[in-house]
Image (spheres, helix red, strand yellow):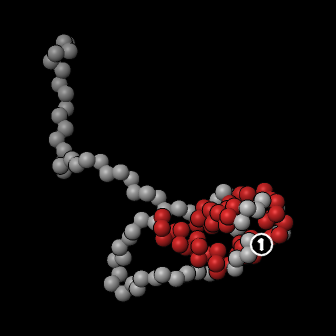
């Protein structure tokens, strides 16, 4: 059999092909956002990991992992880290919420009764 007479299947697309869409940006993880706020606040105060970890009574490696978004912290640990930086837990969460809003893609709600929120929402 010769290679010239080879039968090849012809594919006919059912839908018109459009240019590929770039993937939507991923929303940041909560631990990354909170960690970024902790690091930003610590650096703004020109304080070391050691100084803040001692004031918060948490280990320096653990605080470092929190800042890098490698660990999920309990509310008690977040409150201790926030207080060591002169912030309340609400201040820390509010700053994190501001960062989330800034980085999150805009989503349209399918519910007509959903009210826009501009405050801090926590779930237990």
Q: Position of residue 109 (x, y in %)?
A: 36, 76
Residue 62 visible to the viewer: no
Q: Residue at x 64, y 78 (%)?
A: 91
Give left or right: position of 2 versus 91.
left
Q: Position of residue 12 (x, y in %)?
A: 16, 41
Instruction: Find residue 34 and report its image quarter.
Output: bottom right
Q: Position of residue 38 (x, y in %)?
A: 67, 66
| Residue that mark 1 sits on | 84
Instruction: Find residue 115 and report its image quarter.
Output: bottom left
In the depicted structure, whether residue 10 falls above or below residue 77 = above
In the depicted structure, whether residue 64 falls above or below residue 2 = below
If the image is split into quadrants, where does the N terminus sit? top left
Q: Hey, which residue is sitting farthest top in the picture?
A: 2
Q: Residue at x 73, y 75 (%)?
A: 86
Q: Position of residue 25 (x, y in %)?
A: 43, 57
Residue 19 visible to the viewer: yes
Crowd rating for badge 1 (residues with CA inside 10 Å; few <14, some 14–19, many 20+): some
Q: Residue at x 64, y 59 (%)?
A: 69
Residue nearer the viewer, 7 or 62: 62
In the depicted structure, whether residue 119 falls above or below residue 15 = below
Q: Residue at x 78, y 56 (%)?
A: 61
Residue nearer the viewer, 58 or 109: 58
Q: Classify mark 1: helix, strand or loop.
A: helix
If the image is split into quadrants, where does the C terminus sit? bottom right
Give left or right: position of 82 versus 11.
right
**Count of number-bearing discs:** 1
């Amino acid at each position: 059999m010769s290679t010239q007479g080879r039968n090849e299947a012809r594919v006919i697309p059912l839908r018109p092909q459009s240019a590929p869409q770039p993937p939507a940006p991923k929303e940041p993880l909560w631990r990354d956002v909170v960690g970024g706020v902790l690091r930003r606040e610590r650096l703004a105060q020109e304080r070391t990991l050691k100084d803040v970890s001692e004031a918060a009574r948490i280990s320096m490696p653990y605080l470092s992992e929190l800042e890098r978004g490698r660990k999920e912290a309990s509310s008690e640990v977040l409150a201790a880290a926030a207080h060591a930086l002169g912030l309340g837990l609400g201040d820390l969460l509010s700053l994190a919420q501001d960062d989330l809003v800034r980085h999150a893609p805009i989503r349209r709600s399918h519910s007509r009764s959903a009210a826009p929120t501009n405050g801090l929402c926590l779930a237990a």
